[in-house]
Image (cartoon, rainbow, N blue to C red):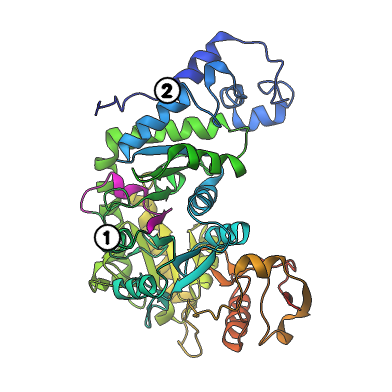
Amino acid sequence: MTVLDQSRAPIYEALDRFRKMRVVPFDVPGHKRGRGNPELAELLGEKCVSIDVNSMKPLDNLCHPVSVIREAEELAAQAFRAAHAFLMVGGTTSAVQSMVLSTVKRGDKIILPRNVHRSVMGALVLCGAIPVYVNPDCDERLGIPLGMKVADVERAIKENPDAKAVIVNNPTYYGICSNLREIVRIAHSHDMLCLVDEAHGTHFYFGENMPVCAMDAGADMAAVSMHKSGGSLTQSSFLLIGPNMNEGHVRQIINLTQTTSGSYLLLSSLDISRRNLALRGKEAFKGVMELAEYAREEINEIGGYYAYSKELINGDSVYDFDVTKLSVNTLDVGLAGIEVYDILRDEYDIQIEFGDLGNILAYISVGDRKRDVERLVSAMAEIKRRFSKGKMNMMSQEYIPPTVVVSPHEAFYAPKESLPIEDTCGRVCSEFVMCYPPGIPILSPGEMITEDILKYIRYAKEKGCSMTGPEDAKIERLNVLK
């Protein structure tokens, strides 16, 4: 195999050449290098709007790349140790959905943990595949879902030998990793594909002493969210495939839903960020790990909070832990995670990634500085002093095993009626309900609505969680099957 020069950034280089050509634009976009929208040019800068351009021969075409985008894909594939890499401009949601749509169709079974991102369930609505859930264990103290037990995956495979694929989160939002190598081995031994939602694991490919990445574990496909820990612009991701996948078929699937007007701002950010990680990722992520460990030690010194790490590892449902994730349980200070999240933003001008009923996640990555972490630690100490209260009546459970009645596709498109949410117990939901972030559905189409689920929704709303999904934005009514 020819070793490619990772210092190259073909899309960025082509854009730079193009900008110097001073081409007169009689094509889209209509702002014409910002001249038609001066406020936009002022906001983003002249250089930025000057490279917000359309596909053309010198710049290649995302739908059918043959030159600079193709080169960027090949460089990314080698950097991520994949057979091929696709540049995705619809976010990791688009990458995850392309992954699912490439492997299953209407009526096919797919094995997955229920704590998947909404994008997986959206793909099942679109294609009509049938989910077979492996319900994850939960950590009772933290109230979070853990990884997939190998024995549970093997049991699901043996009970559903006609399933086409297995999906794994690597890692979860909280940093929990399953035994990915073993799950891949078992799936392949039963002629099933293994797909990995690696939205939060970009750094696994470049850092040292980190959990195994999907491609090294032998997975067939992985959706990698470069804009999270990889440094690219929001909405840019990679879809990686292994040697068992047909590149042409996967590209056809991607082109069913991805825009034909790929943003060169996003594409060039992927190109530059891949180069950056390939050349400097090992050193950068060493610093990220050290910063996250420092933050954990300081937060645990405060008392009450619990910033958890590798001590959770049990060899199965927590096979490994991503130490870059600063996940903190807040219940012992008498505050829900979402309450700490809101106080940090409203009182201290600190925006963290998310808060749920029992935990917060502060995302530490290559752009963070020690003084920023010290400000976070100081704020959390002050929040404990100012706002802590007893732990009584705090709900912590972040996962309620679902009762699946019909497939997501069937439920989403079936005749339905809208009812007050309090009148829906015992009915079958036909839409999504979730807290976002993290975007893991509390209810998906086709699942039974239970009193425990309604209690959870009431509590999450009361605590200020951002609830999304249903047609009714206030989530006072739900659509159910007639």
Q: Amino acid at mark 1?
A: Arg
Residue 124's spot in the image, x, y percent? 57, 61
Q: Is residue 451 visible?
A: yes
Q: Which residues are magenta?
A: 192-209
Residue sticking out furthest to the bottom: 392
Q: How many marks?
A: 2
The residue wearing badge 2 is: 10
Label 1 secondary element: helix
Residue assigned mark 1: 185
Residue contact at pointers 2 and 1, CB within 8 angstroms: no
Q: Measuring 54% from the left and 14% from the top, which residue is drawn there?
A: 18
Residue 431 visible in the shown view: no
- Displayed quadrant of residue 319: bottom left
Foreground pick, 194 / 391: 194
Q: Is residue 92 magenta?
A: no
User: As shown in the figure, which amino acid type bears the numbered disc 2?
Assistant: Pro
